[in-house]
Image (cartoon, helix red, strand yellow):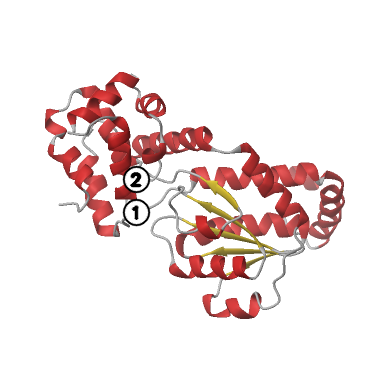
Amino acid sequence: MYKSDIYERIMDKMDQMSKSQQKIAQFIINHPDSAPFLTASKMAQLSGVGEATVVRFAVFLGYQGYPDMQRHLQEALKRQWTTVERLQMTSAANRDKRKSVVHEILHDDIANLQATLQQIDKEEFDKGVKAIIEAENIYIIAYRSAVSLGTFLEFYLDLVLQNTELIVQADGISEHLLGITDKDLVIGMGFARYTKRTVEVMKYAKEKGAKTMCLTDHMLSPLMPYSDIRLTAASDINSFINSFVAPLSIINALITAVTRIEREKVEKRLEELEDLWESFHVFHHSITDES
């Protein structure tokens, strides 16, 4: 079935669980990237059960207590699921046939936002904002599905700061980062399963003395060792894909914080852009606007 012992235990004992225990099991299976780092009280809160129920759940599975179960969850996290295994695991966990897919996934995303809000480090976030503002050049490294996040961040940062580049072509990295210095910032984005190239670029940037920042899913991410600034966001839903609702919310916050601090510069830049957009008729005007 699955190669991780703790998930085998959960699935084998699912039919023996009470409704409260099934809530915990569903949460752990649906959130394999964030659940291993939650305290018993936070897991209870996000699962909708009591803290004592979470502790008893760990014993029910055969562990010595919650810390023992948490350790096994973190060990399981070190192994990267294939897309097929993740699809099998999440499909097996979806036992509530009364809930529509749209309600299920929206509920998962709400849980991701709640988990991210619980774990976000404000000081680390503020360091990220400061690094963006002070950087001479900003390079964003994001591949495969994470490129969607990188594109969004690049669009708005370059719109107002004019110094941001998303490196899309993996083969062109060496040319783009040839002259990188300690005044530059490299932002790496990666979520399970992490691309090898993203990790390699972050390592290279770190060795060259550039400031590095990552946006990833948890503290065991391979991007962590090569990042001066570390931001995490939950991305688990009951599917083989990652959800980027919470990571995008972090990006929204970064952009908003930067523009508020650099308000005068940003206002001037946007005023100039508005005139340019008007000249080139960039945006659609309704009949009411034109009258």
Identify which amino acid the numbered label 2 is placed on: Gln
State the quadrant of the C terminus: top right
* Residue contact at pointers 1 and 2, CB within 8 angstroms: yes
Give the labeled residue for mark 2: 74
Which residue is pictured at 41% across the width and 28% down the height?
Answer: 42
Give the labeled residue for mark 1: 78
Which residue is pictured at 56% across the width and 65% down the height?
Answer: 202
Total marks shown come to 2
- In the image shown, does 177 or 88 lie closer to the viewer? 177
Relative to 291, say whether 214 is above or below: below
Relative to 127, say whether 83 is above or below: below
Quarter of the image where one finds residue 52:
top left
Q: Neighbour class for label 2 at 10 Å: few (<14), some, many (≥20)?
A: some
Which residue is pictured at 45% across the width and 54% down the height?
Answer: 221
* SS category of the residue bearing label 2: helix
Identify which amino acid the numbered label 1 is placed on: Lys
Relative to 15, say whether 237 is above or below: below
x, y (%) of residue 96? 23, 33
x, y (%) of residue 87? 26, 52
Residue 70 in view here = yes
Relative to 236, say whether 16 is above or below: above
- Is residue 128 rendered to the left or right of residue 236? right
The CA distance from mark 1 to mark 2 is 7 Å
- Is residue 66 rendered to the left or right of residue 219? left
